[in-house]
Amino acid sequence: MNRDLFIPTTKKDMEKKGWDYVDVVMVSGDAYVDHPSFGVPLLARLLESKGYRVGIIAQPRWDRADDFLTFGTPRLCCMIGSGNIDSMANSDIAAQ
């Protein structure tokens, strides 16, 4: 599949689209899976369809700022989603 069809996940992807900024940065606890069952890509596609430039930062390292600075400062906002799996199930707390 043509990688140009995906939402940018790196500065290189963003520049390949001819952009020097993004309007919205979406941060996801999940890997980037471009499928409607994943909330962050679904919302990113909706924003994209309205003409916004969206970048996704998937599974950033929480202990370093590098990943969060991938796209620079967004023009409008930064949105954060924890991911598809419920946090209780993800950490096995609910199963104990």
Image (cartoon, helix red, strand yellow):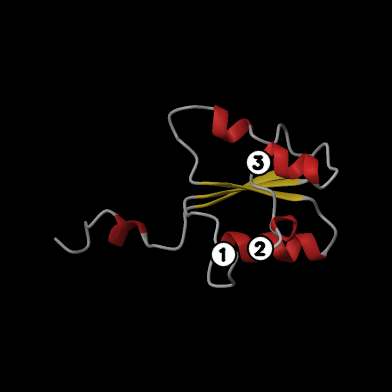
Three-letter amino acid code at the position of disc 1: Gly
Quarter of the image for residue 76 reads: top right
Q: How many marks?
A: 3
Real-space Cα distance between discs 1 and 3? Answer: 19 Å
Three-letter amino acid code at the position of disc 3: Thr
Label 1 belongs to which residue? 39
The tag earlier along the polypeptide, 1 or 3, is: 3
Residue drawn at x 45%, y 35% as measured from the top left: 62
Label 2 belongs to which residue? 43
Between 21 and 17, the residue placed more toward the observer is 17
Residue drawn at x 72%, y 33% as measured from the top left: 73
Q: Is residue 41 left or right of residue 75?
A: left
The location of residue 28, given as percent across then percent down, is: 53, 51
Dot 2 alpha-carbon crowd within 10 angstroms: few under 14, some 14 to 19, many 20 or more: some
Q: Secondary structure at mark 3?
A: loop
In the rendered view, tell whether residue 6 sits above or below residue 24: below
Q: Secondary structure at mark 1?
A: helix
